[in-house]
Image: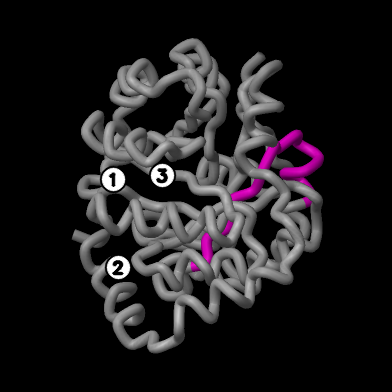
Amino acid sequence: MYLESIVAQHRAVAARDDRSTSELIASCQQLSPTRGFASRLRSDSRSALAVIAEVKRKSPSKGDLWGSRPIAPLVQAYVEGGASCLSVLTDVDHFGGSPVDLAEARSLTSLPVLRKDFTVSLNDVVDARLMGADCVLLIAAVLSAAEMADMVGVAREVGIDVLIETHDEEEVERSLDLGVEMIGVNQRDLVTFEVDHERALRMASVIPSNVVRIAESGVRNRSDAEDLRRAGFDAVLVGESLLVSTPRRARLPTSE
């Protein structure tokens, strides 16, 4: 299973990280406030489905997507296309990303930016803040309840938003117990890579309306977006369909 091997690699790296978490947290105190990832989605979704557009160079299942090309034209296309926020892959080995991509993307726009990576330690959370991210991704499937609680606590301490990615109702319940503002539902099975559109439509109803509801992965077109909006989602996170079908101009699958 590719997810297990990627997470194992990240955990191995984290185990060798001997930096003091408390010192890293202290170093965040002088940083400027983040741009408000959750608040931007909440505001934009009042009038239309908000879009988080993703900068992803490659993936284990699809190979090269954006490759080694400069990301500036892609970010510009996303901004001109009406994206509410950006998501930037920072995993180096499996997705070809880097913290440099995140810093550059954020410098090119005023939009809030999500660090999308395999967060497995408290230092990973603080690193997201230090590299300039406005939001950090936590994947419920690879974290224990205790790990998620500790990470959410550290995120609040350093002033960065949290998006918890879920795949079933049990993971949604664990996320709600932490009082988070945003919950994502990944439509793609992390084992088979298959997209289960119906699962996302079903799970929207178990996420309270006071939480920002985000559908992740497998949003192929405007019809998918309209289905998700009707189901109750506030936003969609879109990457591969934009990168593969419209590399020159990002046509975002927004829905009124």
Instruction: Name the one closer to the observer, 47 or 222.
Output: 47
Circle 1: residue type? Phe
Q: Are marks 1 and 2 in contact (CB under 8 Å)?
A: no
Residue plotted at (45% across, 86% down): 19
240 lies above or below 210? below
202 lies above or below 110? above
Residue plotted at (70% across, 16% down): 47
Q: What stretch is highlighted in magenta?
A: 76-90
Q: Answer with left or right where residue 220 lies relative to residue 165.
A: right
Q: In which quarter of the view is residue 127 placed?
A: bottom right
Q: Name the residue under label 1.
A: 193
* Image location of residue 121, percent across then percent down: 37, 69
Q: Answer with left or right where residue 154 lies relative to residue 189.
A: right
* Image location of residue 206, percent across then percent down: 33, 20
Nearer the camera: disc 3 or disc 1:
3
* Image location of residue 71, percent across then percent down: 70, 62
Label 1 environment density (alpha carbons within 10 Å; few <14, some 14–19, many ≥20): few
Instruction: Name the one closer to the observer, 104 or 133.
Output: 133
Can residue 55 be spotted in the picture?
no
Q: Mark 3 points at which residue?
A: 164
Q: Is mark 3 on a helix, strand or loop?
A: strand
Residue plotted at (58% across, 49% down): 54
Tag of residue 6: 2
Can residue 152 be spotted in the picture?
yes
Circle 2: residue type? Ile
Instruction: Name the one closer to the observer, 79 or 153.
Output: 153
Nearer the camera: disc 1 or disc 2:
2
